[in-house]
Image (cartoon, rainbow, N blue to C red):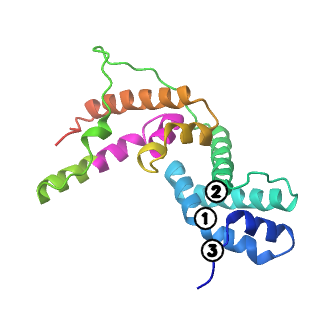
Amino acid sequence: MEQFIQDDELIRRYQQGEECAIAELLERHKKRVFTYILNVARDRNVAEDVFQETFFKVIKTLKKQQYSGEGKFIQWVMRIAHNLMIDHFRQSGRISTVSKIVRPDGKVTNIFDVIKVEDHSHEDTLVKHQIRKDVRKLVEHLPQEQKEVVILRHYYDMSFKEIADHTNVSINTALGRMRYALINLRRLADEHQIALSA
């Protein structure tokens, strides 16, 4: 059985002239990176462009021997992808500011608490599946920074510390974005008359 080679070892080999090492790194991580970009971009053409640009930048940096993130290759690649997405949204004018909408009663309900799938009956499962689909549609209406935090937290299961590191903001900023995202999701659900609990 072939022994698993760590990312850092593949990077070292590539920097010493083994071209096949970069191909293995790309093959290993391409699905995760592309899925992340596509989830944020919601446009396959944009996602493919950003994906190619991400790995072009990765290869360029590795060739110049400027990579120094021992043991954290995938986090570094995801940060590059994230920054390129931000650049893309800035250029296309799609980054909007955080809108501070607070309900009159001041309550913030974490709607994801009510949509965890539990095995009760086939009907319950179908209803909860529909709620998840409805919530996913509502997420698309959020400002970009809020949308990204929601996706990373609830679809990639990242901690707020990981989200903060990944998006290059403080934990408080990441928490704030999630708080406003939940407020906005509740407002959007009310506006679209979508029930968020079965």
The residue under the point 84% across, 53% down is 66
Label 3 CA crowd tier, 10 Å (few <14, some 14–19, many 20+): few
Q: Is residue 135 magenta?
A: yes
The Cα–Cα distance between marks 3 and 1, rounded to whole angstroms, is: 14 Å
Q: Nearer the viewer, residue 137 or 9?
A: 9
Kind of residue sitting beneath label 2:
Ile
The location of residue 183, given as percent across then percent down, is 37, 27
Tell me, for residue 29, which label it has, or none: 1
Find out whether the residues at labels 1 and 2 contact each other: C-beta distance under 8 Å.
yes
In the figure, residue 62 lies in which quadrant? bottom right
Reading the chain from its start, which is encountered first: label 3 or label 2? 3
Would you say the residues marked 3 and 2 are in contact, meaning their CB atoms lie under 8 Å apart? no
Badge 3 vs badge 1, beta-carbon distance below 8 Å: no
Measured Cα–Cα span from mark 1 to mark 2: 7 Å
Q: Which residue is drawn at 56% across and 53% down?
A: 37
Q: Which amino acid does label 3 sit on?
A: Phe
Compute the Cα span from label 3 to label 2. Answer: 16 Å
Q: In this view, does 21 lie to the left or right of 74?
A: right
Q: Is mark 2 on a helix, strand or loop?
A: helix
Mark 1 and mark 2 lie on one chain; the one further toward the N terminus is 1
Nearer the camera: disc 3 or disc 1: 3
Q: Residue 140's x, y, as percent?
A: 43, 43
Q: Give the range drawn in magenta.
A: 132-151
Magenta residue check for 166? no
Residue 57, given in percent of the width and then of the height, sits at 76, 56
Q: In which quarter of the image is residue 94?
A: top right
Report which residue position mark 3 lands on.
4
The answer, for residue 60, to whether it is visible in the render is yes
Residue labelled with disc 2: 74
**What SS does tag 3 mark?**
loop
Mark 1 neighbour density, 10 Å: few (under 14) some (14–19) many (20 or more): some
